[in-house]
């Protein structure tokens, strides 16, 4: 089965606290409806492997995929990661905030082990 088209993406750089920056590429793929649910694949290359996010319908799957990206990046920031629009930028940037969401981190957990798609 072919991969679904990418419907949203963003590229920037991250420093996980080591002082070295690496490229981050976020991709959200077109949601797919199934019998009783829908799913949307999300990749945050350089931060997490590709995951499949499930919802009741394609709108919820897409909304949850965007929220997952926001929460993941905000949690990494809380853990000491810094994000930059360009590799040479001097000031870090709260990249998740430009997407219109400031997550509450208290109950959010990134799975310790995920299956790569």
Image (cartoon, rainbow, N blue to C red):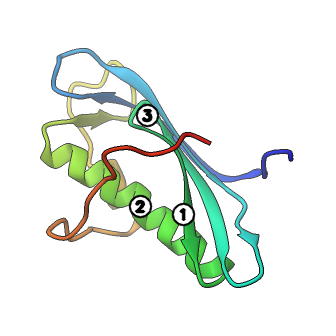
Q: Which mark is on residue 12?
A: 3
Q: Hey, which quadrant is residue 106 in on the image? A: bottom left
- Give the SS element for disc 1: strand
- Among the two numbered marks 1 and 3 on one chain, the one whose residue lies closer to the N terminus: 3
Q: Which residue is drawn at 14% across and 48% down?
A: 78
Taking the image as shown, residue 85 lies to the left or right of residue 80, namely right
The CA span between labels 1 and 2 is 8 Å
Q: Does residue 104 lie above or below 9 as drawn?
A: below
Q: Mark 1 points at which residue?
A: 53
Name the residue nearer the viewer: 114 or 3: 114
- Give the SS element for disc 3: strand
The CA span between labels 1 and 3 is 22 Å
Residue 3, given in percent of the width and then of the height, sits at: 79, 46
Taking the image as shown, residue 46 lies to the left or right of residue 78, namely right
Q: Do the residues labelled 1 and 2 touch (CB within 8 Å)?
A: yes
Name the residue nearer the viewer: 99 or 30: 30
Q: Residue at x 20, y 45 (%)?
A: 77
- Among the two numbered marks 3 and 2 on one chain, the one whose residue lies closer to the N terminus: 3
- Give the SS element for disc 2: helix
Q: Are marks 1 and 3 in contact (CB under 8 Å)?
A: no
Instruction: Tell me the mark number nearer the camera, choosing from 3 and 2.
Output: 2
The CA span between labels 3 and 2 is 17 Å
Q: Name the residue under label 2.
A: 68
Q: Residue at x 67, y 77 (%)?
A: 58
Q: Does residue 57 lie above or below 26 as drawn?
A: below
Q: Within 10 angstroms of label 3, few (less than 14), some, or many (20 or more) residues? A: some
Residue 14, given in percent of the width and then of the height, sits at: 32, 30
Instruction: Tell me the mark number nearer the camera, choosing from 1 and 3.
Output: 1
Q: Hey, which quadrant is residue 81 in on the image? A: top left
Extreme top residue here?
Answer: 20
Residue 19, given in percent of the width and then of the height, sits at: 18, 16
Q: Does residue 11 lie above or below 87 as drawn?
A: below
């Amino acid at each position: 089965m072919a991969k679904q088209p990418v419907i949203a993406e963003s590229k920037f750089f991250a420093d996980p606290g080591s002082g070295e920056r690496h490229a981050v590429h976020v991709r959200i793929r077109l949601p797919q409806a199934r019998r009783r649910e829908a799913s949307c694949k999300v990749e945050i290359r350089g931060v997490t492997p590709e995951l499949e996010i499930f919802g009741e319908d394609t709108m919820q799957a897409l909304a949850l995929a965007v929220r997952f990206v926001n929460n993941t990046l905000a949690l990494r920031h809380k853990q000491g990661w810094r994000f930059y629009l360009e590799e040479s930028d001097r000031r870090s940037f709260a990249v998740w905030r430009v997407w219109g969401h400031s997550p509450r981190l208290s109950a959010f957990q990134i799975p310790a082990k995920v299956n790569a798609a």
